[in-house]
Image: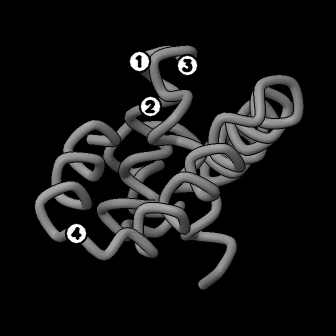
Amino acid sequence: MEKFIYYTRLFDCYKKLLSANECATFSSYYEDNLSMQEIADNKGVSKSAIGASLKNTEMKLMSYEQALHLEARLEKVRKLISKVDDEKIRESLEQILK
């Protein structure tokens, strides 16, 4: 479960750096909860092609995070926001992150 959450957060940060096909495959697997076989059947490719695509996308996401640290920084900001006592300020800060 942690893997899914981690990759989904990275995807939220870096999806604009991926191809449309990478985004669609990743989204189908991680967000729509389709199996690799279901995605392969929908795309008319092999299950191993989907597995390779997902692995490649995961590696790209991790390399982007290692270089840019956006998700790590966002997590620090989320933690700081949760400590803000003023609800109006907290909501305003949360809106900025969206």
Proximity of marks 1 and 3: CB atoms separated by less than 8 Å: no
Q: Are marks 2 and 1 in contact (CB under 8 Å)?
A: yes
Q: Which amino acid is tagged 1?
A: Ala
Mark 1 element type: helix
Q: Which of 51 and 93 is in front in this view?
A: 93
- Residue 86: numbered disc: 4
Closer to the N terminus: mark 4 or mark 3? Answer: 3
Circle nearer the N terminus (1, 4)? 1
Along the polypeptide, which appears first: circle 3 or circle 2?
A: 3
Quarter holding residue 29 = bottom left
Q: How far apart are marks 1 and 3 (CA)?
A: 7 Å
Say which residue label 3 marks.
Answer: 18
Residue at figure coordinates x 18%, y 47% from the top left = 92
Q: Distance between the residues labelled 2 and 4?
A: 37 Å
Left or right: residue 85 compared with residue 79: left
Residue 32 lies in quadrant: bottom left
The label number, if any, that marks residue 9 in the structure image: none
